Image (tube, rainbow, N blue to C red):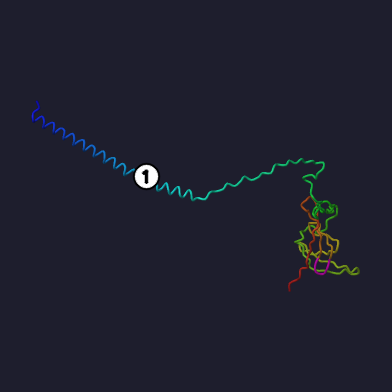
Amino acid sequence: MMTSSNIAKMSNNAAEKNKNSNMSALRLFSLILVSLILQACIQVEGLDDLRQYVKETQETPVGSIEPLPEFKPYESFLYRATSLRGPFQPLIRVEPSEEEEIVKNDLKPDFERPKEPLEAFKILALRMVGTIHMLGEGELMALVEDGNGEIHRVHKGNYLGRNYGEITQVNETQLDIVEIVPNGRDGWMKRPRNLVLVEKSE
């Protein structure tokens, strides 16, 4: 038999369970609501960025790919030396230069000729100090001072200097000389020089 106290306890227990059930439902509803709000915010922001990206992509001009270049087929060539000019043969005939002609000629000093006194000195050590006329013949001769201060009389055909220099002309103001010197190609070449009269200072 249920007493009044039992009935009161059962009522209290039912009320407590109902209260707890209501609290659980409210918490669950709150969590669901918060989740939906957050998801909606995320979706809205994500969609804006996506729409902007799609729009920019669609507005980008479409590029074009250039076609590949055309390559001409390789044409082989058969070289026949019997019918064509040699690859190292010049196109035109090359005339030898003046220096090459000098190498080929037979120019050289007369090594058997007796040396003259002024050939013992360098031409830069010699000075033309005057001229004289030979009596009877009327030939003009030059007076040349050597490196030792001695005076020598010379005329056309005499030699002086160490490069086989031959006097080719004598006049009142200078001696014209032609030397024979090495050309650097195992040959010899002529080189004109002159010895100018040294005027006396007053």
Indicate the position of residue 182 as horizontal and vertical percent values: 78, 53
Q: Quadrant of the C terminus?
A: bottom right
Judge left or right: residue 140 versus residue 46.
right
- Rendered-image quadrant of the N terminus: top left
Residue at (81, 57) in percent of width and height = 190
Residue located 26% across and 40% down the image:
29
Q: Dividing the picture into quarters, in which one does residue 84 lie?
A: top right
Residue with the most extreme left position: 4
Residue 103, x across and y down, in percent = 81, 52
Q: Secondary structure at mark 1?
A: helix
Q: Nearer the viewer, residue 171 or 116?
A: 171
Single out the residue that lies furthest toward the right. Answer: 136
In magenta, the rendered stretch is 170-174
Considering every residue shown, the one lying at the far bottom of the view is 202
Residue to which mark 1 is pinned: 43
Picture layout, residue 82 above or below residue 159: above
- Residue type marked 1: Gln
Spot the residue most to the front: 1
Q: Determine whether, in the image, residue 24 is placed left or right of residue 158.
A: left
User: Residue 5, percent across and down?
Assistant: 8, 30
Task: Please tell me which residue lies in front, 131 or 151.
Answer: 131
